Image: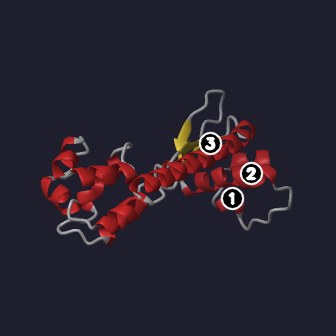
Amino acid sequence: MKSKRRAILSELSEQRALRSAHFERSLKKIKRKLKGQLKLTVLSEADRTPLVNYLIDCNLEGVGEKRLSWIKDNDEVTPIKLAELINSGAEALIDNGWEITQSTANSMTKMSNLEILKMEELELPDIIKIELNVAHGEQEHYRSLDKLSTGQQCTAILHLLLLQNKDPLIMDQPEDNLDNAFIADRI
């Protein structure tokens, strides 16, 4: 039964990878149209928030969000890999190099088999990183969406909205939250 479950989990992982690859191919078309304006990057299965939330919901003794910060700091963390390490014991968790404390490792090894099996099935969403070219000259200079002003964020999103939609867009006071150069060039 375990081998059958492993085969199903492996197939699930392959299907998720295929979906991510298909999404990446679709995104390439958009990237070409936005060259010099926006950079779009897909980080496959990089949002580990569902894993952190799941572990918090398991009510592990002495383990809260702060004690699980190592999950977001390590790109190698996957639900399946973590489940394997939990099944191998506290020392395997600590020796893996993810900076797990002894008490957190001990608490994780007390998870029930059902909790571990459910954790293996968790899906980690992709993160789509959006960067706007903030330079107005020849040299491109990109800034991440979270480091942009409100007006620049609106500009970045409007680049995406106006890409394929030819319908009229009605905006009330676009000068309040949009770059004037963007209004002149695109709208």
Residue 43 lies, with reference to residue 176, above or below; the image says above
Residue at point 46%, 49% (across, down): 46
> Where's residue 94, x and y in %?
18, 46
- N-terminal-most mark, 3 or 1: 3
Q: Nearer the viewer, residue 130 or 105?
A: 105
Residue identifier under label 2: 183
Pointers 1 and 2 in contact (CB under 8 A)?
yes
Question: Of circles 3 and 1, which is in front?
Answer: 3
Compare residues 156 and 186 and report the one nearer the observer.
156
Amino acid bearing label 2:
Ile
Percent x, y of residue 25: 68, 40
The N terminus sits in image quarter: bottom left
Residue at 67% over, 45% down:
22
Q: How many neighbours does mark 1 have within 10 angstroms: few (below 14), some (14-19), or many (20 or more)?
A: few
Q: Which residue is mark 3?
A: 21
Mark 1 or mark 2, which has the lower sequence index? 1
First reached walking from the N terminus: tag 3 or tag 2: 3
Q: How many marks?
A: 3
Disc 1 target residue: 175
